[in-house]
Structure formats: C-alpha cells, structure tokens
Image (spheres, grey):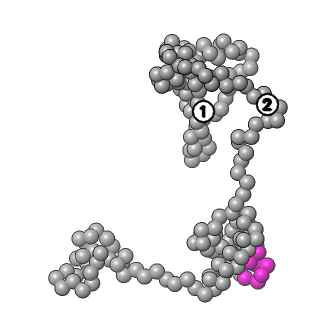
C-alpha cells in the first residue's frame, strides 16, 4: 500500500492519503520469545492429554513443573494457539424417559385454508444479562403471525387456568 521508494510522495503524505496511521506502516510484530515457545509446547502436550483444562488448570500444571507463570499469560498463549477448554454443554434437548410421545397429526394433511393449522415457536434471544423469550403463534396457510409475546421470564399461565382460557388469550391477542 505505502511505497517507501515513491519519489514525489513522502511516507507521511501517502499515509494521510490512505487514511492510515504512520505508525502502522512502521509496525513490525515482535517474534515469539523462546520461553513462550517452550511454554506453548508444554501447553500443547498437556492439552492433548486433558482438553478439558482451561487456563487456570494449565497454569497450575505449569507451576507444578517449576514455571513461574500468570494465568493471563497462559490464557494469552492458549488464545494465540487457538486452544479452548472442552467442557460438557447443557443438555437441553434430552427428553425425560417417562415423557409421552405424541403422534404427529399433520403427517398426511393438506392445508387448504387459513386457520386450519396454527403453529407456535419459542425463541431464546441471548442478551448481555440472560435471555429474552419470544413466543409466536403463526397460521401455516398464510404464514401470518397471529400473536406474539416477548418476555424476560418464562412464566407460564397458572395451572388453575384451564386450556380454553389459554386458547382464548391467544385468540384474543390474534384479533380473531
């Protein structure tokens, strides 16, 4: 981008024209130190044995080997190497063994008119401090969203309210 041998334009002028800082033209990345290369080799060896270890466990391991090292240094080296601790994810889609499996009623059904079949969807929207929950009721024929609610809690309708009351809430909010 910047040509240092340009006869008519100085480096400062070229940097101004390209809208970049002059220091970025002169920047040269520092080579990785020999000590860090040794630590990276040890981290890599241990990571192959125990991929569940994060920076804290890895720091403790390196300290046991006699290296005086900070957790943030280990964290930086692991990030540089592209290593992350592998840990079990939440098992949110495992049904309870006693859960009843309901038949799929729409298998051979042809949807020919509006309000013949509705569907619902619950979407988790990640936020800075938790989740927002979006619930939508949609008509399958027209793909129109009949009703939706956005909430910061997953509060359900009290159990003493019957099924018809719940359906009435959905129908009323859909304007039908």
Q: Where, by quadrant of the figure, is residue 33 drawn?
A: bottom right
What's the mark number on residue 40?
none
Whether residue 130 sits left or right of residue 111 in the image: it is right
Q: Which residue appears farthest toward the right when viewing the image?
A: 98
Q: Is residue 140 magenta?
A: no
Give the residue displayed 28% in from the left and 68% down from the top.
19
Q: Which residue is mark 1?
A: 122
The question of residue 66 being in magenta is answered with yes
Residue 12 placement (x, y as % from top left): 26, 78
Quick check: 165 above or below 87?
above
Q: Determine the CA span between mark 2 and mark 1.
A: 20 Å
- 87 relative to 168 in the view: left or right: right
**Badge count:** 2
**Residue indicated by mark 2:** 99
Give me the residue at 74% from left, 16% from top: 160
Q: From the top left corner, tell me how far across and down residue 124 is, in percent.
A: 59, 39
Viewed as shown, does residue 70 lie left or right of 127? right
What span is in magenta? 61-67
Identify the image quadrant of residue 47. bottom right
């Amino acid at each position: 981008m910047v040509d240092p041998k340009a006869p008519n334009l100085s480096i400062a002028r070229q940097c101004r024209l390209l809208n970049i800082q002059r220091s970025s033209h002169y920047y040269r990345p520092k080579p990785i130190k020999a000590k860090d290369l040794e630590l990276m080799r040890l981290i890599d060896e241990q990571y192959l044995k125990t991929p569940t270890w994060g920076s804290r466990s890895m720091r403790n391991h390196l300290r046991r080997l006699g290296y005086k090292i900070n957790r943030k240094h280990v964290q930086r080296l692991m990030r540089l190497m592209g290593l992350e601790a592998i840990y079990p994810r939440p098992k949110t889609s495992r049904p309870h063994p006693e859960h009843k499996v309901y038949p799929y009623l729409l298998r051979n059904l042809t949807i020919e008119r509006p309000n013949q079949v509705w569907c619902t969807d619950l979407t988790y929207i990640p936020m800075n401090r938790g989740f927002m929950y979006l619930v939508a009721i949609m008509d399958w024929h027209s793909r129109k969203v009949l009703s939706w609610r956005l909430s910061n809690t997953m509060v359900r309708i009290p159990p003493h309210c019957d099924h018809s009351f719940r359906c009435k809430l959905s129908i009323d909010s859909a304007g039908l």
